[in-house]
């Protein structure tokens, strides 16, 4: 964390800010803040944009063992068009960056460099029953690596389905044994 930011957070009443960046595609980036507006890195982060506002940035929970880091991002789209754009299938997987910083109350400028709290991707959107709030679970790269991929097997038949004619696994034994990666293997009654 930046030394100036640490000093500001240690002051009596720091004015903190959350900065949310969503990179929808190569040309569209949404920059939100949790109130007012802030200039950072030559860009302006606003509470209200053409896309709407950030309703809530959920608690970022650290993953332990076979769990992953997770967070929920809730948005209030400003219009039906913004809503349609934010729930479009191609938005799933868009990069999300969440930074935490502090603002000098007198100048309105950021103090030091904001701290990156989370780098993640948008997952499937959920619509709340009231008010048109849109919620996303933010999925990290480690979560993607822990997804079940039953269709991918360390077998000769799967290997040849991907690389036809490649016989690298044709005479290998012991491949029927399930390999547990980044998780604890279940205890078996028979070993």
Image (cartoon, rainbow, N blue to C red):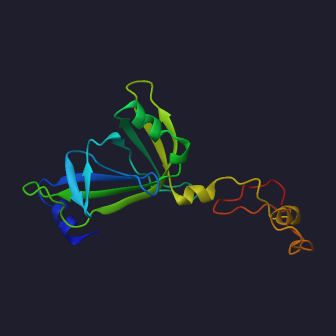
Residue 18: x %, y % from top left: 28, 52
**Farthest-out residue, right:** 171
152 or 36, nearer to the observer:
36
Q: Is 23 positioned to the left or the right of 185 in the image?
A: left
Q: Residue furthest left?
A: 106
Is residue 101 visible from the viewing direction of this image? yes
Residue sitting farthest toward the front: 27
Determine whether, in the image, residue 16 is placed left or right of residue 143: left
Of residue 123 and residue 83, the one placed in the foreground of this image is 83
- Image coordinates for residue 73, horizontal then vertical, percent: 41, 44
Q: Residue 145: where, in percent of width, then height?
A: 61, 59
Q: Visible in this render: residue 54? A: no
Q: Residue 53, percent across and down?
A: 31, 40
Quadrant in which the N terminus is drawn: bottom left
Q: Is 87 left, or right, of 165 in this rendering?
A: left
Q: Which residue: 82% across, 68% down?
A: 163
Image quadrant where one finds the C terminus: bottom right
Total numbered labels: 0
């Amino acid at each position: 964390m930046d030394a100036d930011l640490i000093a500001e957070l240690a002051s009596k009443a720091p004015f903190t800010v959350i900065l949310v960046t969503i990179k929808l595609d190569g040309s569209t980036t949404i920059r939100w803040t949790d109130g007012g507006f802030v200039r950072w890195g030559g860009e302006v982060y606003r509470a209200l944009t053409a896309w709407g506002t950030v309703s809530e940035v959920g608690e970022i929970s650290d993953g332990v063992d076979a769990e992953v880091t997770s967070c929920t991002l809730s948005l209030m789209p400003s219009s039906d068009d913004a809503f349609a754009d934010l729930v479009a299938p191609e938005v799933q997987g868009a990069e999300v960056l969440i930074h935490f910083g502090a603002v000098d109350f007198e100048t309105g400028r950021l103090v030091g460099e904001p701290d990156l709290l989370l780098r993640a991707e948008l997952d499937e959107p959920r619509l709340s029953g009231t008010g048109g709030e849109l919620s996303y679970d933010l999925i990290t790269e480690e979560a993607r690596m822990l997804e079940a991929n039953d269709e991918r097997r360390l077998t000769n038949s799967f290997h040849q389905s991907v690389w036809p004619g490649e016989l690298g696994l044709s005479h290998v034994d012991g491949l029927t044994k399930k390999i547990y990666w980044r998780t604890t293997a279940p205890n078996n009654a028979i070993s």
